[in-house]
Amino acid sequence: NAGVTQTPKFQVLKTGQSMTLQCAQDMNHNSMYWYRQDPGMGLRLIYYSASEGTTDKGEVPNGYNVSRLNKREFSLRLESAAPSQTSVYFCASSDIRNPPGELFFGEGSRLTVL
Amino acid sequence: TQLLEQSPQFLSIQEGENLTVYCNSSSVFSSLQWYRQEPGEGPVLLVTVVTGGEVKKLKRLTFQFGDARKDSSLHITAAQPGDTGLYLCAGALRNAGNMLTFGGGTRLMVKP
């Protein structure tokens, strides 16, 4: 059972480089999310997509863009990476938004920006 | 300042001890979830509480939602090394479209 799959798992970038984190879920969930996790900060929401064709900003959207390619896939793009974007990124999906259902997370993508 | 404050941030105990982790806020939540995260993995849901005063038990873990739905606690009885991990609470705010806001986490280490 794949669940939520993220690629790549590790990435090192230089300041100013761009990259895209890919996420795919096979649970037929409507909602998908991108979080970043920093020590002591818990998980902070970057962007989310409540359903195919819609995306909305979360708590910390600056410096990121997203694309909901189809129901399965939700990508996160860093156009010009900065050291402050060094973090572990998690993609998640859920089936029920109101009330919030269980979030299913991928294994994370560890990004270092030099 | 985070909307959800978890305490303690770190906890190191011996196997067999009891512990309580707290999740506090000045905001009222429509529901609250607890997740556990192990190194190199994503968080996994343990429980969702919805009603003020609600108590849920999951084997040796007891979860309580405050009467006013502003706080929650997680109590572990007779902790085991397998309980080691990062515990995260996440609250849903009705006036924020029920989006989940996470606390900073409590990192628990249970030594054999």
Image (cartoon, rainbow, N blue to C red):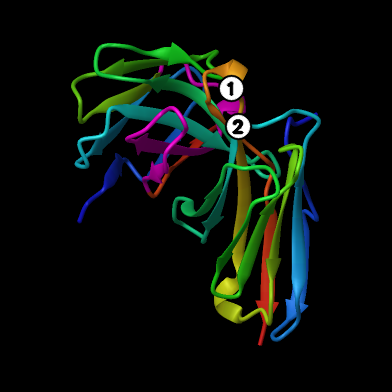
Name the disc covering residue A33, or none.
none
Q: Residue at x 54, y 74 (%)?
A: B59
The subunit letter for the residue under badge 1 reads: B
Q: Which numbered disc, 1 or 2, marks the residue that appears first in the sequence? A: 2
Label 1 secondary element: helix
- In this picture, residue A15 sits left or right of residue A68: right
The subunit letter for the residue under badge 2 reads: B
The x and y percentages for residue B45 are 47, 52
A82 drawn magenta: yes
Whether residues under marks 1 and 2 lie with C-beta atoms below 8 angstroms apart, the answer is: yes
Front position in the image: A60 or A85: A60
Reply above or below: B34 against A99: below
Q: Residue at x 78, y 35 (%)?
A: B25
Res. A10 visible in picture: yes
Which stretch did the figure color magenta?
Answer: A78-106
Front position in the image: B24 or A88: B24
Name the disc covering residue B94, or none.
1
The x and y percentages for residue A8 are 32, 41
The x and y percentages for residue A65 are 40, 14
Q: Amino acid at mark 1?
A: Arg
Same-subunit check for callouts 1 and 2: yes
User: What quarter of the picture does the N terminus of chain A occupy?
Assistant: bottom left
Q: Which residue is mark 2?
A: B30
Q: Residue at x 30, y 16 (%)?
A: A67
Residue A18 picture quarter: top left
